[in-house]
Amino acid sequence: KAGVTQTPRYLIKTRGQQVTLSCSPISGHRSVSWYQQTPGQGLQFLFEYFSETQRNKGNFPGRFSGRQFSNSRSEMNVSTLELGDSALYLCASSGQAAGEQYFGPGTRLTVT
Amino acid sequence: GQQLNQSPQSMFIQEGEDVSMNCTSSSIFNTWLWYKQDPGEGPVLLIALYKAGELTSNGRLTAQFGITRKDSFLNISASIPSDVGIYFCAGQLQGAQKLVFGQGTRLTINP
């Protein structure tokens, strides 16, 4: 089975721009979660989608949004980018109500 | 919000030594997960624990879910160079997908 894939792997944007990141979960997994990883804050939960519905949301501003499609693929959007948004964005998929999550390789976003 | 305290933050050991790291929380978790992350990659799941007191092994790795449900530890026996990386614990509340992560333990091995 193919693992979680994320595109693009690297991205450089300037302040004020917006960005869209994509995640394809493991086949058959319907839950997709997004996390932000920075040296200062570590791994922080952004949100989780299941069957095209956002089920949980972390403590991030409204500039961070996401969606999930009927094939369980998910996208995450960040608008009006700030320097502090530079991070590794990770998505994880799960095939269970709770429990094991499998991570993709991440998208490294650099905001200049 | 929930926070996990993971220790130690870093370890420098000789190849062949055993390693132990742990996580504690002020909150009760229903699931504990242990991950390893290599530079430039996403975390890879090592062990999942679902029951208080549960002891689970995966090769040279052994992890336990604490009786109080507020802690977990991971042991690595007979370390080898490929064990180098950052290890994270993660806790999960009942019925929720959100993972709360520890700060990580950076493992360095001197050959």
Image: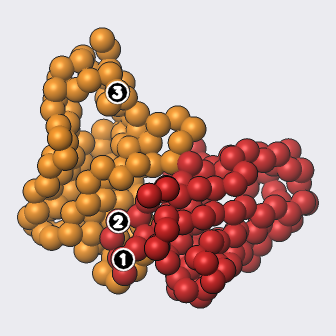
Chain colours: A red, B orange
Image coordinates of residue A22 in percent, x first then y, are 69, 63
Question: In the rendered structure, are the residues bearing label 1 and label 2 in contact, judged by CB atoms less than 8 Å apart?
Answer: yes
Residue at 20% from the left image edge and 69% from the top image edge: B50
Asked which secondary structure carries label 2, the reply is: loop
Badge 3 and badge 1 both on one subunit: no
Callout 1: SS: loop
Residue B2 can be seen in this image: yes
What residue is rendered at 30% in x and 59% in y? B33
Q: Residues within 10 Å of mark 2 (few under 14, many from 20)?
A: many
Q: Are marks 2 and 3 on the same chain?
A: no
Question: Where B30 sits versus A91, above or below?
Answer: below
Chain ID of residue with mark 1: A
- Which label was assigned to residue B82? 3
The amino acid type found where label 1 is placed reads Gln
Please give the count of numbered marks on the rendered protein. Answer: 3
- Indicate the amino acid at tag 2: Glu
Q: Which residue is mark 1?
A: A96
Q: CA distance from mark 2 to mark 3?
A: 23 Å
Q: Which residue is mark 2?
A: A100
Residue A58 in sight in this render: no
Please state, as top left, top right, bottom left or bottom right, where the C terminus of chain B lies in the image.
top left
Relative image position of residue B16 (x, y in whole percent) = 18, 20
Chain under disc 3 = B
* Between B109 and A70, the one nearer to me in the picture: A70
Q: Quadrant of residue B15?
A: top left
Work out whether A79 lies above or below B62.
Answer: below
Question: Mark 3–mark 1 contact, CB under 8 Å?
Answer: no
Q: Quadrant of the N terminus of chain B?
A: bottom left
Q: Residue at the spot x=37%, y=81% of the render?
A: A97
